[in-house]
Image (cartoon, rainbow, N blue to C red):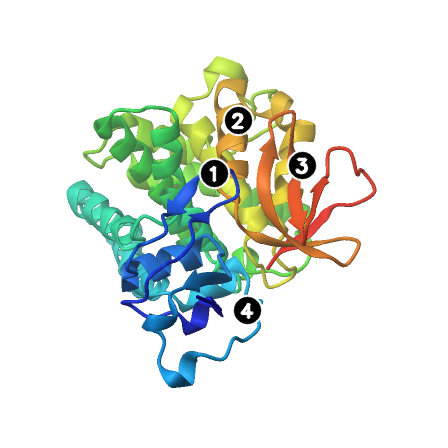
Amino acid sequence: MAIISLDQVKAGMILVDDVYIFNNKLLLPKGTELTDYMINKLGFYAIKSVKVSDEALSADDTSVTEPTEQSYTQRLRQSTEFKAFKEEYFKNVYQFKTDFLEIANNNEKIDTDAFVTKISSILDSCGGISVFDMLHCMRDYDDATFVHSLNTALICNVFGSWLSMSKEDNDVLTLAALLHDIGKIRVPDSIVKKTGVLTETERTLMQAHTVYGFEILKNQDIDERIRLTALMHHEKYDGTGYPKRLKGEQIEDFAKIVGIASEYDSLTASRSYRQAKCPFDVIRQFELEGLQRYDTKFILTFLEHISNSFINNTVQLSDGRQGEIVMINRQFLSRPIVKCGTEFVDLSKKTNISIESIV
């Protein structure tokens, strides 16, 4: 028997001990003959080393090395699934840009079936890995209208499943998210891409993208909820949004959902004038103000699920330590339990420590 780091593991090796993940759930039993798929699975769960039979090792492999300290994110970026996702993602985002310009400038008919098929192809390329993990691995890319629209659509597709929507409704929601910012095409680039604070005039023009989006979509043969989402996705439940300061049930439900997903993506994506915010900082911001600004039947579902999507991720704590998120506290979603070495740090009790970043 030998303990070897995951980067030394090869297909055909035999496990001589059970492999468990954070919640004491059995991942792979002893006696398993490892395949490439299983090795990838070990990496996705941030397993750093395993015990294998000596008989499976060549003479050059018998020396035991210290496990590598790659994070979950680093392993994910090296996976074939992430590479496939990234290729499919950018192939489609460039096509969406072309399509959006044709729709906005030439009144090209929207092919809803083709749009849904493209989104499905991106999601299928994840290979079962959380799309939130995939998007987090791409947060170094500067946020742009078309990237943001695609991200919001992917997030909403998952969000719709959390809300137990029918496939038909979830397809409409995904399209509404994809097209929600199409009105920005009619806002001058100098405003959309400005790195500084907008003037009052510039802010008014920027906010007009909601009305522009509705006007672009108003004569298209699409579900009415898609048009209303373009118009209302910046409205807030407490009436503080725009363009019409609508409140509560005056706002289309799909616009409420897309508004949450859009805000989350905007805050966790890089901008030319700031770095991406840590998802747990964003979750904390939602916890503090979300119950007033967003419909609770949507925001609570989103926050609980989005928090759980980061289980197994490696994080940097404010005290300098790195650890792995092993459990989410439902009462304090932004302050999970983090395993640092052999210590379990409950951030809901260690209020002087916080998560600085996901690594």
Residue on which the image places disc 3: 284
The CA span between labels 2 and 3 is 12 Å
Name the amino acid, label 3.
Arg
Q: Where's residue 110, x and y in %?
A: 20, 44
Q: Assign a secondary structure to mark 1.
A: helix
The CA span between labels 4 and 3 is 34 Å
- Which tag, 3 or 1, sits closer to the chain's start? 1
- Which tag, 2 or 3, sits closer to the chain's start? 3
Q: Left or right of 18: which side holds 99?
A: left
> Image point 65% across, 61% down: which residue?
273
Image quarter where the C terminus lies is bottom right
The CA span between labels 2 and 1 is 10 Å
Q: Which disc number belongs to residue 299?
A: 2
Q: Are the residues at dot 4 and dot 3 in contact (C-beta closer than 8 Å)?
A: no
Task: Give the total of numbered labels.
Answer: 4
Q: Where's residue 247, x and y in %?
A: 55, 17
> Image point 59% across, 45% down: which residue?
325
- Which tag, 4 or 2, sits closer to the chain's start? 4
Residue on which the image places disc 4: 67
Image quarter where the N terminus lies is bottom left
Name the amino acid, label 1.
Ala
